[in-house]
């Protein structure tokens, strides 16, 4: 008897990026995986994105969030929605991406090879330079920046052409098994943007599961389209999220290395950016770090598995039932 392919919700997070989201939808609709639903999670857009997408793609399912609390809140809403509605996996995606048609097939293939594999990510290239790697899986370290991408900026010569366990999977494109959600809890919107992917993967791995890079799954990323370059807002959020991650997971040695690298890197960044008139970006990171050290940090949000008789359930906030084609469900 042929076993049905696991059911996947491919959820694209959009905030006021209707043109780039249209391009992502066009690419994702070409995926050849036999059992997936494509969903756009609209994170309170103000540019008419839902209407524009509905006009161009009448059968596209959209879920709307009424209040934007950062990209992490959009990811958290898409995460809850998918598992509330019975999917075996959720594929969370940035909107600034293009994919090869077999992306999802290869991600699910890697995940299904071992029930302990609960987070899977693709080989990511720079969209504008399709031989230059953006990420071949993630590395975690307690330095001035918590996360780092394997192979970043390298020309692809096959050096990452094998699947591998990694510290974390970048949220640009992360396939998550339901088992991971039930064991590790929900996506945490405390982070606003940045490091939320590392946080979730850390919790998953502490539950005994694996995070894996699948080299045959390929994606092209319009890097920094959403968060911008070396800007004050971006750096504030990176500093804040990094400090939260350190507070949640660091041991004494991790604290020492993080403080040392941070203390050494901030003056260097200020001097470098001052020559460009952009020293405010370096100062913003310091302000973000101080904010992350100051705020109260609640435990990670829980996710309760659905009852066997019910197709929907609620986590830390309520989740909508599925909407029909071209209709928008709403996520509080």
Image (tube, rainbow, N blue to C red):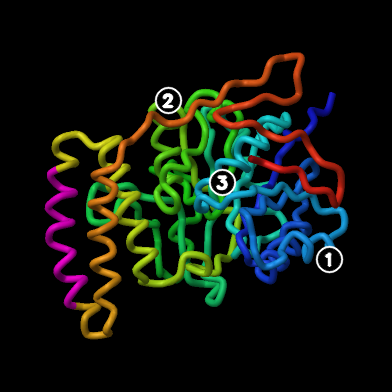
Crowd tier of the residue under label 2, counting other residues whose Cα lies within 10 Å: few below 14, some 14–19, many 20 or above = few
Check disc 2 and report the residue beneath it.
208
Going from the N terminus, do you reach mark 2 or mark 3 first? 3
Q: Give coordinates of residue 57: x percent, y percent.
A: 84, 61
Check if mark 1's residue and mark 2's residue have beta carbons within 8 Å: no
Is residue 179 found inside the magenta-colored segment of the image? Answer: no
Q: Residue 33 appears at what percent x and percent y?
A: 76, 47
Of residue 50 and residue 99, the one placed in the foreground of this image is 50
Q: Which residue, given by chain and number where applicable, does mark 3 sit on?
A: 75
Q: Which residues are magenta?
A: 256-271
N-terminal of the two: label 1 or label 3?
Answer: 1
Q: Which residue corresponds to the image point at 22% horizontal and 85% vertical from the top-left?
A: 275
The picture quadrant where one finds residue 115 is top right
Q: CA distance from mark 2 to mark 3?
A: 23 Å
Visible in this render: residue 315?
A: yes
Indicate the quadrant containing the C terminus: top left, top right, bottom left or bottom right.
top right
> Closer to the observer: label 1 or label 2?
1
SS assignment for the magenta stretch, majority: helix
Percent across and percent down for residue 215 are 54, 53
**Quick one: label 1, few (<14), some, or many (20+) residues within 10 Å?**
few
Q: Residue at x 24, y 45 (%)?
A: 293
**Callout 3: few (<14), some (14-19), or many (20+) C-alpha neighbours within 10 Å?**
many
Q: Quadrant of the N terminus?
A: top right
Give the number of the disc on residue 56: 1
SS of the residue at dot 3?
Answer: helix
Dividing the picture into quarters, in which one does residue 176 lie?
A: top right
Describe the element under mark 1 as helix, strand or loop: helix
Labels 1 and 2: the sequence-earlier one: 1
Instruction: Name the residue at 48% across, 68% down.
Output: 224
């Amino acid at each position: 008897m042929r076993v049905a392919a696991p059911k996947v919700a491919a959820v694209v997070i959009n905030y006021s990026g209707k043109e780039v989201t249209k391009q992502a939808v066009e690419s994702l609709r070409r995926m050849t995986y036999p059992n997936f639903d494509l969903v756009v999670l609209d994170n309170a857009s103000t540019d008419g994105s839902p209407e524009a997408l509905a006009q161009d793609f009448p059968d596209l399912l959209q879920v709307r969030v009424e209040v934007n609390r950062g990209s992490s809140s959009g990811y958290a809403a898409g995460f809850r929605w998918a598992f509330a509605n019975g999917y075996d996996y959720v594929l969370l995606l940035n909107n600034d991406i293009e994919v090869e048609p077999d992306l999802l097939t290869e991600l699910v293939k890697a995940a299904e090879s071992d029930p302990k594999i609960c987070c899977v990510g693709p080989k990511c290239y720079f969209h504008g330079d399709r031989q230059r790697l953006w990420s071949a899986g993630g590395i975690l370290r307690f330095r001035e920046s918590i996360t780092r991408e394997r192979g970043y900026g390298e020309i692809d010569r096959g050096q990452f052409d094998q699947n591998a366990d990694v510290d974390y999977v970048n949220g640009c494109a992360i396939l998550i098994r339901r088992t991971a959600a039930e064991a590790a809890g929900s996506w945490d919107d405390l982070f606003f943007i940045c490091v939320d992917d590392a946080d979730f993967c850390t919790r998953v791995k502490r539950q005994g599961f694996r995070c894996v890079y699948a080299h045959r799954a390929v994606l092209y990323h319009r890097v920094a389209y959403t968060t911008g370059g070396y800007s004050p807002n971006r750096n504030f959020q990176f500093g804040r999220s990094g400090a939260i991650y350190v507070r949640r997971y660091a041991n004494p040695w991790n604290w020492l290395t993080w403080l040392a690298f941070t203390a050494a890197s901030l003056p260097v960044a200020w001097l470098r950016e001052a020559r460009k008139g952009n020293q405010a970006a370096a100062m913003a990171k310091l302000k973000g770090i101080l904010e992350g050290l100051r705020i109260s940090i609640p435990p990670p949000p829980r996710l309760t598995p659905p009852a066997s008789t019910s197709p929907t359930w609620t986590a830390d906030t309520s989740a909508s039932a599925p909407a029909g084609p071209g209709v928008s469900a709403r996520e509080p």
